[in-house]
Image: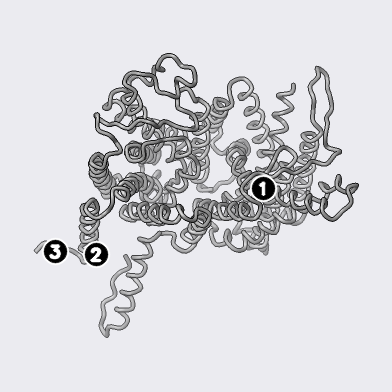
Amino acid sequence: MLQLFNGISVSSILLLIALGLAITFGLMKVINMAHGELIMIGAYTAYVVQNLFAAYLPDAAFGWYFALAIPASFAVAFAFGLVLEMGLIRFLYGRPLDSLLATWGVGLVLQQIARSLFGAPNVGVTSPEWLNGGITAFGGAVFPYKRLFIIGLVLVCLFVMYLYIYRSHSGRRMRAVMQNREMAACLGISTRSVDAVTFAIGSGIAGIAGCALTLIGPIGPSIGTYYIVDAFMVVVLGGVGKLVGTVFGALGIGLSNTLFEYWTTASLGKVLVFLCIVAFLQWKPMGLVAMRSRSLDN
Amino acid sequence: MLLRTMPPQRIWLLAGYAAAAAALFCAPLVLSDFRLNLLAKFLAYAIVALGLDLIWGYTGILSLGHGVFFGLGGYAMAMYLKLNAGGGRLPDFMDWSGLTALPWFWKPFGSLTFAVLAGILLPMLLALVLGYFTFRNRIRGVYFTILTQALVIITVTLFIGQQAYTGGTNGVTGYGKLFGYSLASPDTKRFLYWVTVVLLFGAFSLCRYLVKSRFGKVLRAIRDGENRVRFIGYNPAVYQKVAFSISAGLAGLAGMLFVLHVGIISPSMMGIVPSIEMVLWVAIGGRGTLGGAVLGAILLNSAKSAFSESYPDIWILFMGALFVVVVVFLPKGAAGLFSQLKRVGRRKAADEGANGVRHPAV
């Protein structure tokens, strides 16, 4: 039971990270290896907000810093994403492997900058008082509030993303570009601005993920690299272009990771998960949910 | 006579090769033992770069997993050295982890022939298996790249986790003798340098032969239009698998040489960062040109050892920036820059000459 809960908790974080990746990959065929560093930026934003609250506001207000940290993380990562898209990604359109290498370079630089700004050792973010403790459920298993809060946060993000993608004008434009870029451009959609905004939103979500990670443990300059490969596996497993695929991909990887590691050891568990993914791709090479298209090369 | 019949480009190329060969021959006379050992290490890296170029530059498949193949080769050689260093005793890290008998898969590594064969064939086999399960489903491009990166992660966690069998984070080290000769002595080092030079030439010739053959033409065709190749009647998956596997074998060979030069192999040398650094060597030197790949590996590593010792922070910034600059501005690397300059120069000459003949673009 507790394992199941842990698995869902891991999945929820993976989902938050993979959401942005899946969207940008589906839309622009760009693999953003700097995504992990956007997570890091979000995490350090939360750290800075916490320090500002501790320094300038009365103690009573401190507990509420997290409410401000979430939008702040989103905003900062959003801005970084926008700059990254306009300054670099835009020029690598249609060269997915190159974009992968270039963004990895960006990630390296960002990590190094964080290292010189905040120092190489991990820093801790004090969780607000109201998130300590947990619910004791049947059988004595404790569900920490922090984990529950993260799951709730992810659900909210997912819902907002759903509304944005499927129920807003901007989201409709995004889906149109995703399905057929040339046709969308012919119909008067500015694919450039759609690209930029979508990339920035994906980055912003990574920022929120970083903010959420501060609740779980200390943060460091290379916090993103720890999650990024798993998040990419979610995208590979889930397929691109549909939210559902990403959700199930994240659940699949998060749960199987936790369960396999529980049944075997941490290192063997990872191997088993990888084998499962490769086996699964034999059955569905394009992932769980693939966008249908008649084009040969997609 | 022969020179006169050759196109000028060919002559330049030959001259370049001759110069490179001369430089490698003279190096032991000029360089100190320490520098020579470094150079030997870089030459081993150049073998990896050749393999990577074959798969990335010529076939268009980006592998971020070559660290694993490199590491497997390295471990095979390290296991042989370790078994022969202890004089029949258990390797020390097994003692610490409480093993009392040698694990079965360590036993055959007591023989050098087996270790060398395993160091090349194991990576090839792993690449073949991964290639079989991915290429046949037309999993390619970034999907394949991500899978290779996942392969790196799980291999590294596995090697760290199974401390009793692999030495964990510390890796396998603490040997020091090859055929009874100390690995640290300058004579052995010089000998190993020559071995590396010969193997690099061998690897280069192999890759050159492959690239010039019909096989190489199909590889390039796959890179430029996989579906067309399929429609013509080739099965791209077979070619991709074979190329990937050869490339992995070269990485394994390089790993073995690396262990002989450096004297240690550990999971951190096969991780994500080293794997992607290998890609950078090829990118810098110029993908799609074998000479460029070799040159890139040697140049970048020389720069790294010059800078990173005194300014490790700046080196990381520099490497990150280099990735961006090379990918955005120099997609064909230094070799591409060279031919670009040549083309510009030639066009200028053609424009200036009153009846200059325009050469067709190369």
Looking at the rendered image, the quarter that the N terminus of chain B falls into is bottom left
Position of A41 with respect to B184 (left or right) is right
What amino acid type should be assigned to the residue bearing mark 1? Ile
Q: Secondary structure at mark 1?
A: helix
What residue does disc 1 label? Answer: A39
Q: Position of residue A277 (x, y in %)?
A: 56, 31
Q: Residue furthest left?
A: B1
Chain ID of residue with mark 1: A
What residue does disc 2 label? Answer: B9
The label nearer to you, 1 versus 3, is 1
Indicate the quadrant where residue B230 lies.
top left
Above or below: residue A140 compared with residue B126: above
Q: Spatial distance from mark 1 to mark 3, Cα to Cα?
A: 59 Å
**Count of number-bearing discs:** 3
Closest to the observer: B112 or A150? B112
Q: Spatial distance from mark 2 to mark 3, Cα to Cα?
A: 11 Å
What amino acid type should be assigned to the residue bearing mark 3? Leu
Q: Position of residue A204 (x, y in %)?
A: 71, 52
Q: Spatial distance from mark 1 to mark 2, Cα to Cα?
A: 50 Å
Query: For mark 1, does the 10 Å Cα neighbourhood hold few (<14), some (14 to 19), or many (20 or more) residues?
Result: many
What amino acid type should be assigned to the residue bearing mark 2? Gln
Q: Are marks 1 and 2 on the same chain?
A: no
Closest to the observer: A216 or A192? A216
Query: For mark 2, does the 10 Å Cα neighbourhood hold few (<14), some (14 to 19), or many (20 or more) residues?
Result: few
Position of A95 with respect to B38 (left or right) is right
Q: Secondary structure at mark 3?
A: helix
Chain ID of residue with mark 3: B
Q: Position of residue B355 (x, y in %)?
A: 25, 83
Closest to the observer: B308 or A16? B308
Residue B206 visible: no
